[in-house]
Image (cartoon, rainbow, N blue to C red):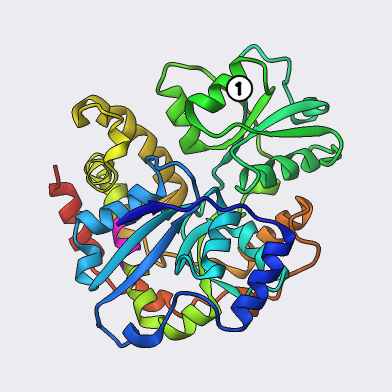
Amino acid sequence: MRHSLRLGVTAATLAALAVLSACGGGASSSSNSASGAEASLDLAVASAVIAPKEEVATYAVGDAEGYLSEEKLSVDVINTDGSVAAIQAVASGSADITAADAGAILAAREKGIPVKAIGGLVQNWPWRMAVQPDSEIKTPADLKGKEIGVISLASGSPIYARAYASDAGLDAAKDIELLPVGVGAQALSALEGGKVDALALYTQAYTTIENTGTELRYLDNSDAFEGIRSLTFAVTEKTLKEKKDVLTRYLRAMYKALLFSAVNSEAAMRDGYQAFPQLLTGKKADDRIADDSRTLNAWIKTAIPATGERESFKNWGAISDAEWNKTIAYTKTSGQITKDVDLSELWDDSLLGGANDFDSAAVIEKAKAAK
């Protein structure tokens, strides 16, 4: 069963969620936390639109290739309006787990919502600033006084845009304007129509645009953005306490699916069509597979090690203290949080040993043989 949940976020809502979570609110129960027992989870996708990205490379592949069934797991997917809304869904009990922007997790924690990060997903910085090839904007400083298109105000997009402006020496609150434009054709139309001067999207979203034959020019990210973490799996403290085994099995299935996708993105994309038929937009799979596989592969590159052979990939989901500290600093610079966050309250990597307990060679062999 798949359904869509569109959530908005206000300060009052977040405060109420903090109280609800502290009182034990939420959908999790300990009834199926016994090791190896059949269990179900609700997954909040931090995007209103299904696309060739994390929901395909992890959930869809995990479902189609049997990685979820091997773990005796059933997963339902809920769409939200972005990372902040996805965290809200988890905090309220509408979902059990999400892969949300690390900044949104940090902000929720600062507001008293007891969410925990339990495993990384996107490990290479995915956000870029793009303009039209003939734009007068040549450097980050040229964004002063400009309109920047972001996915939504509940996504990681405006966080990046503000941090980018601040890194360029601009006043993010005064020197730029942010306008929600979505992704894909909607975002491109806003840029080409002059509604915005630049876009602040992630690499996979740009690949979707470039697949139409459109050319974009990218502004450089400074070294300040290297090592910052993006999408990260998060749950409430209550869910972590009651469902450690279930969550370990879920993460293991997702990391196996990600490895499979990295080896054979075309087979992964066909699994995506099976899980999410709306991706086909009424067309045949063979007519879409080339562009969609290219788009999916752009996302996969953000989620796997930048160097090394796939056979040697280890420590899926690991995030170092240095990476967390840089992510915290970035989130403070962007104005999403106002103080440092205690890593012992935010981050729990105790499930990653079990999540990495799988035969990588078997996953790779299966992916290579897949059609």
Task: Say which of 288 and 351 sits in front.
Answer: 288
- The C terminus lies in which quarter of the figure? top left
Seen at 60% across and 22% down, the residue is 190
Q: Position of residue 207 (x, y in %)?
A: 45, 30
Q: Position of residue 164 (x, y in %)?
A: 72, 40
Residue 298 visible in rendering:
yes
Q: Position of residue 162 (x, y in %)?
A: 74, 43
Task: Say which of 22 and 240 sits in front.
Answer: 22
State which quadrant residue 51 falls in.
Answer: top left
- Residue 254 falls inside the magenta stretch: yes
In the displayed orientation, state which residue is furthest to the top: 134
State which quadrant residue 142 falls in.
Answer: top right
Task: Say which of 206 and 305 sits in front.
Answer: 206
Quick check: 37 above or below 368? below
User: Dominant secondary structure of the magenta stretch?
Assistant: helix
Seen at 29% across and 49% down, the residue is 261
- Residue 126 falls inside the magenta stretch: no
Number of dots carrying numbers? 1
Q: Position of residue 176 (x, y in %)?
A: 79, 33
Residue 329 visible in rendering:
no
Seen at 54% across and 43% down, the residue is 126
Which residue in the protein does label 1 denote?
A: 190
Q: Amino acid at mark 1?
A: Ala
Q: Is residue 316 left or right of residue 345?
A: left
Q: Is residue 38 left or right of residue 128?
A: left
Other-residue count near label 1 (Cα within 10 Å), few / some / many at <14 / 14–19 / ≥20: many
The residue stretch that appears in magenta: 253-257
Task: Say which of 290 and 24 sits in front.
Answer: 24
